[in-house]
Image (tube, rainbow, N blue to C red):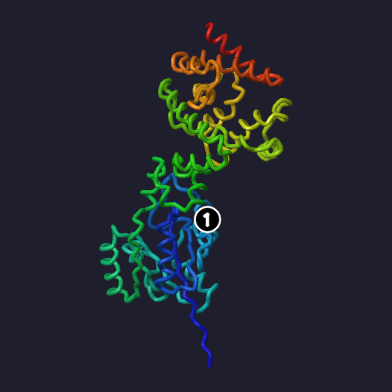
Amino acid sequence: MAFSKTEKIGLFGGTFNPVHIGHTEAARLAVERLGLDKLIFIPTLNPPHKELPESSASAETRLEMLKLASKGMESVEVSDIEISRGGISYTADTIKELQKLYPGAEFWLLMGNDMLCTFESWRSIDWLVKNISICALSRHSDKSDIELCAKNLEEKYGVEIVFAHNSAIDISSSQLRQLLKQREGREYLNEDVYAFIVKNRLYGVKPDFDWLREKATAMLSASRTPHVLGCEQEAVSLAARWGADEDDARSAAILHDITKKLTLNEQLILCKKYDIMTDTAESSNVKLLHSKTGAAIARDIFGMPEQVCDAIKWHTTGRPGMSLLERIIYIADYIEPGRNFPGVDVLRRTAYTDLDKAVLMGLEMSIESVKEEGQIPHPNTLLAIEYLKRSIKA
């Protein structure tokens, strides 16, 4: 007589705010340690025992990050069962629902230190201990605490508890949220999750500059990379000289040419995608379009604030009434260390003594260059020149 094997299912619930590699590594270890047929990540909608911080991502966003983090993991899936149910996310209610979906399955509840040590206060504790087993997940820093809590539960309730120690990764989501605000913590996140956090500006994240530089470089031609790195160096130096935000200057400089290598047709496709309005001169000039499409990509993919996007948008033509950051990026693009043309040394010296005069000189030089190429200067450049002349004269 053949007997069917009981399905072993691990349930890993929590806020995952955000999910990090400590979570995914713990899941992998649990699957291996317990011999699970399936592990289900279950993001909590409203945790019963604590309030989510104000800066938390929404439940739907946390669900999306879990899907990104678990992509490609064998025997792992993500469920929206608690989000769909609404209300307070009580584990007993979730397991009762899952028992209907997986009749006869053996459920293992994965718990970290904070969950295990408050388990006795959970709703329907007596029912829970009869219907689940526990896999205790511990980081190195809380190993002794979690073992003490587990011993108490085993003695009091007779519940089976198995340990899965994760000694390699010792980080909590709350610690990670603080690191993200300081341009740190990327190493604790799945690459796609980090990109998602940056794009959506979650947790007050400030992108890691090495990561930003790496992503921008991948979008550049090899010959363009030294120019961009030089522009970054110059922009930061100018920002320090004139009292601008150095981080904004660095970000704008790194990203200012990210669509430079695209063809005219590719530029126009991006214009359509991002509803970018173009004039007659721009629609036929790839050099002009890359500023606008680059600003759109900086906003959409890298979550850059408007002041940075504007600096990218106007770094080619300029405009009347340019902000300090816009003027810095415009002239940094012109005088970065790799530039070598008649008058560049004078322009460099002027940029550190009279920024407006330097920008005016740069705009006038660009007009001459455009005319030499047989093209018509862009109206914004002409307007910027007139504006600066009036401003300097005043």
Whether 290 is drawn above or below 394: the answer is below
Give the residue furthest to the top. 393
Whether 70 is drawn above or below 306: the answer is below
Q: Regarding mark 1 in the picture, which secondary structure is present there? A: helix
Whether 190 is drawn above or below 164: the answer is above
Q: Residues within 10 Å of mark 1 (few under 14, many from 20)?
A: some
Residue 275 falls in image quadrant: top right
Question: Looking at the image, how many numbered discs can be counted on the residues?
Answer: 1
Residue at figure coordinates x 46%, y 26% from the top left:
234
Residue at figure coordinates x 51%, y 67% from the top left:
74
**Image position, residue 112 (x, y; %):** 36, 62
Residue 68 visible to the viewer: yes
**Image position, residue 26 (x, y; %):** 40, 63
Residue 326 visible to the viewer: no
Asked whether 91 or 269 is in front, the reply is 269
Asked whether 361 or 176 is in front, the reply is 361
Residue at figure coordinates x 49%, y 77% from the top left:
7
In this picture, residue 95 sits left or right of residue 388? left
**Image position, residue 240 (x, y; %):** 41, 24
In this picture, residue 280 sits left or right of residue 344? right
Residue 124 falls in image quadrant: bottom left
**Image position, residue 199 (x, y; %):** 53, 43
User: What kind of residue is marked 1?
Assistant: Leu
Whether 348 is drawn above or below 245: the answer is above
Write down the residue under mark 1.
68
